[in-house]
């Protein structure tokens, strides 16, 4: 009985987040129509049949998320881990920032940074306003708004999608010849640390590491991760094209929502670096957007994503064979999964 109630609570929680996200998008697009009508004429409508398929994927995602928690792969408390304080504090700022985003989007300005933001020393592909967001990834304000923006984008499903990496990672670590209770796990492009929070709850005794190019996002990650009990993850500002670790160091490496924001050769370089730094037998998991080959029915959504948000590498990403890239680096692709709007490559470095 207790389990049934807990499951219903979880479903109600997720449905509420979903409605909040949808309502936010509906209301703000109505306001935008009035004050700054979008100039991108090529937004495609999504058919009712596709919306039904998407809803079906949504329900399956919730079922899988609940089932994994029930099986003990991660604690049930993780299902409700939501930064309510940040949401209350930063939602007004997110609303106030919208007119600037609309103006940037209507005028295709994607290289605009506040005066105090330092843009030197970063790769060219990175110094831009992805999603037309203010200051790209390079200010504290951007870091404060990011989690909220992503939750709204995915109608409250960003975290359930991130959690899909946990079961295959756990299985991969347990199957290693020298399985350990203290695995070293790296999250590449850790952003504000949402995935590291999940890894900490799932692997309480692990040593966690995170790299990201953005000092502001790392500062935010440090703040959110220091709320948790246990060893603090070691965070480093670094370009994932040159990971600052020795060969064969990690038991597991994860990378969430990075690859669609990279030029193709950089995707390969980062996969090669993950191969170099993971131990033989170690598990590497990439989570990113679905692609044309696995979700052709979602093509209009994919085209809208790159048309509405500034995502210059997305069109190339959705056609890219990440499987081939993993194999080129030396990985074995163990499994490929699709959950809602995300795709997962589970790869292993041969032992
Ligand atoms: C879409 S966000 C994803 C963040 C996080 N993984 C998540 O799940 O929300 C992309 C992140 O990749 C980082 N990034 C982009 N290019 C990078 C690179 N070459 N090396 C390290 N981090 C990078 C950005 O600073 C940003 O935090």
Image: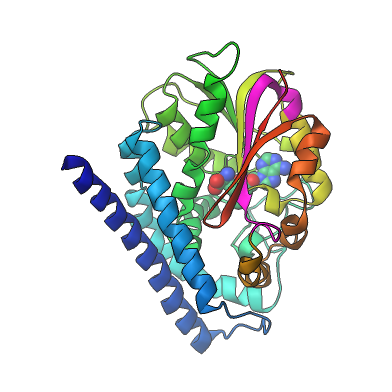
* Up-down relation of residue 136 to residue 328 (above or below): below
* Up-down relation of residue 242 to residue 144 (above or below): above
Q: Which quarter of the rendered picture does the N terminus lie within?
A: top left
Q: What residue is shown at x 38% (from left), y 51% (from top)?
A: 86
In this view, the residue in front, 272 or 290, is 290
Which residue is outermost to the top?
A: 178
Estimate the x, y position of residue 265 in percent, counting from the top left. Answer: 84, 46
Q: Quadrant of ligand 1?
A: top right
Estimate the x, y position of residue 119 in percent, counting from the top left. Answer: 72, 50
Q: Indicate left or right for 327 with 172 as reference.
A: right
Q: Indicate left or right for 121 with 191 as reference.
A: right
Q: Indicate left or right for 242 with 195 as reference.
A: right
Q: Main secondary structure of the magenta part?
A: strand
* Count of number-bearing discs: 0
**On the image, which quarter does residue 266 sit in?**
top right
Estimate the x, y position of residue 252 in percent, counting from the top left. Answer: 60, 26
Q: Indicate left or right for 294 with 223 as reference.
A: right
Q: Residue 63 in magenta? A: no
Q: What residue is shown at x 32% (from left), y 37% (from top)?
A: 70
Estimate the x, y position of residue 319 in percent, counting from the top left. Answer: 76, 58
Q: Residue 293 in magenta? A: yes
In the rendered image, is residue 193 in sight?
no
Q: Which quarter of the rendered picture does the C terminus lie within?
A: top right
In the rendered image, is residue 30 in sight?
yes
Which residue is outermost to the left?
A: 1
**On the image, which quarter does residue 172 sit in?**
top right
Give the magenta part as a residue range. 275-294
């Amino acid at each position: 009985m207790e389990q049934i109630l807990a499951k219903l609570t979880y479903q109600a929680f997720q449905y509420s987040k979903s409605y909040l996200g949808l309502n936010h998008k509906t209301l703000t697009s109505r306001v935008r129509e009035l004050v700054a009508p979008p100039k991108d004429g090529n937004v495609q409508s999504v058919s009712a049949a596709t919306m039904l398929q998407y809803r079906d994927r949504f329900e399956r995602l919730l079922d899988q998320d609940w089932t994994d928690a029930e099986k003990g792969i991660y604690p049930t408390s993780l299902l409700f881990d939501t930064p309510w304080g940040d949401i209350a504090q930063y939602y007004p700022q997110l609303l106030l920032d919208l007119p600037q985003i609309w103006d940037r989007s209507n005028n295709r300005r994607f290289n605009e940074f506040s005066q105090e933001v330092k843009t030197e020393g970063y790769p060219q592909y990175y110094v831009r306003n992805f999603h037309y967001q203010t200051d790209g990834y390079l200010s504290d304000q951007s870091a404060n708004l990011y989690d909220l923006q992503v939750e709204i984008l995915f109608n409250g499903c960003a975290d359930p999608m991130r959690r899909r990496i946990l079961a295959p990672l756990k299985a991969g670590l347990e199957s290693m010849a020298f399985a350990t209770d203290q695995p070293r796990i790296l999250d590449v492009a850790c952003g504000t640390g949402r995935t590291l929070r999940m890894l900490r709850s799932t692997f309480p005794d692990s040593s966690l590491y995170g790299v990201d190019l953005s000092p502001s996002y790392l500062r935010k990650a440090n703040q959110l991760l220091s709320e948790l009990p246990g060893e603090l993850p070691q965070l480093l500002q670094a370009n994932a094209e040159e990971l600052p670790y020795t060969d064969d160091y990690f038991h597991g490496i994860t990378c969430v929502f990075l690859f669609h924001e990279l030029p193709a050769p950089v995707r390969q370089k980062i996969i090669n670096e993950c191969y170099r730094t993971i131990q033989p037998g170690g598990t590497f998991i990439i989570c990113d957007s679905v692609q044309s080959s696995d979700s052709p029915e979602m093509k209009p959504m994919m085209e809208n994503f790159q048309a509405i948000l500034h995502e210059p590498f997305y069109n190339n990403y959705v056609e890219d064979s990440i499987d081939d890239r993993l194999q080129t680096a030396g990985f074995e692709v163990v499994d490929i999964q699709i959950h809602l709007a995300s795709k997962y490559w589970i790869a292993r470095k041969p032992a």
